[in-house]
Image (cartoon, grey):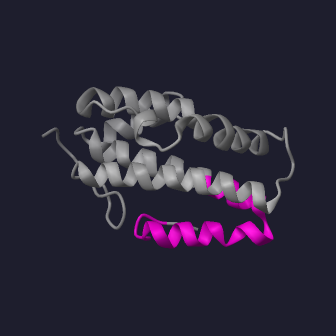
Amino acid sequence: MFTYRDKQSTRHSRIRSFLKTDPFVAVILSAIDFEWTVRRAILGLSGLPTKPIHEIFKSERSGGLSGLQNHWKKLVKSRLGSDLASIVPNWEFFSNRAFGLRNKLVHGAEGRVTPEHAGKIVDSILAGSVAVANYAEANNATIFGKKIRRLKTR
């Protein structure tokens, strides 16, 4: 559905288009977009070759918000000093309510969500994606439009 070549604004427009017809899908897609954006930012910001980072993603728990936070802390915060919670706007709402709903939907604890409620959640999650992408850009890592591939440590 999405590729690294897509513009972030295009991705987010497609995700928001589901709010009226299938808000459940919009929430899930927004969470996927956030997780993808954070992984790409980690690849671009870590300063390490991409192959070992991909191996870390495969071997260690990297799913969900806590897995992403752990990888960010280990691979980005240690290098640049900012943790994920300081980058994503309104972290308390984002981590508890927005990703909380994502978790309930994915794991079957809730089966539906209204378009109004989903809109607030999607807005929060996509704002997190934008903040992470902006942070990456500000630190010379482009995560959209090109492959991220580093073969050797700089």
Q: Quadrant of residue 45?
A: top left
Q: Is residue 110 above or below residue 3?
A: above
Q: State yes or no: residue 11 in magenta.
A: yes
Read off the magenta span: 3-30
For the question of whether residue 28 can be seen, the reply is: no
Frontmost residue, 72 versus 128:
128
- At 44% from the left and 56% from the top, the residue drawn is 130
Q: Quadrant of the C terminus?
A: top left
* For residue 97, side relative to residue 43 (left or right): right
For the question of whether residue 134 can be seen, the reply is: yes
Q: Is residue 118 above or below residue 107?
A: below
* For residue 36, side relative to residue 21 (left or right): left
Q: Position of residue 95 (x, y in %)?
A: 60, 36
Q: Position of residue 68 (x, y in %)?
A: 49, 35
Q: Is residue 116 above or below residue 91?
A: below
- At 42% from the left and 31% from the top, the residue drawn is 71
- At 40% from the left and 48% from the top, the residue drawn is 132
Q: Position of residue 147 (x, y in %)?
A: 32, 60
Q: Which residue is most to the left?
A: 154
* For residue 73, side relative to residue 63 (left or right): left
- At 31% from the left and 64% from the top, the residue drawn is 146
Q: Position of residue 75 (x, y in %)?
A: 33, 31
Q: Quadrant of residue 46?
A: top left
| Predominant SS of the magenta segment | helix
Q: Quadrant of residue 118?
A: bottom right
Q: How many marks?
A: 0
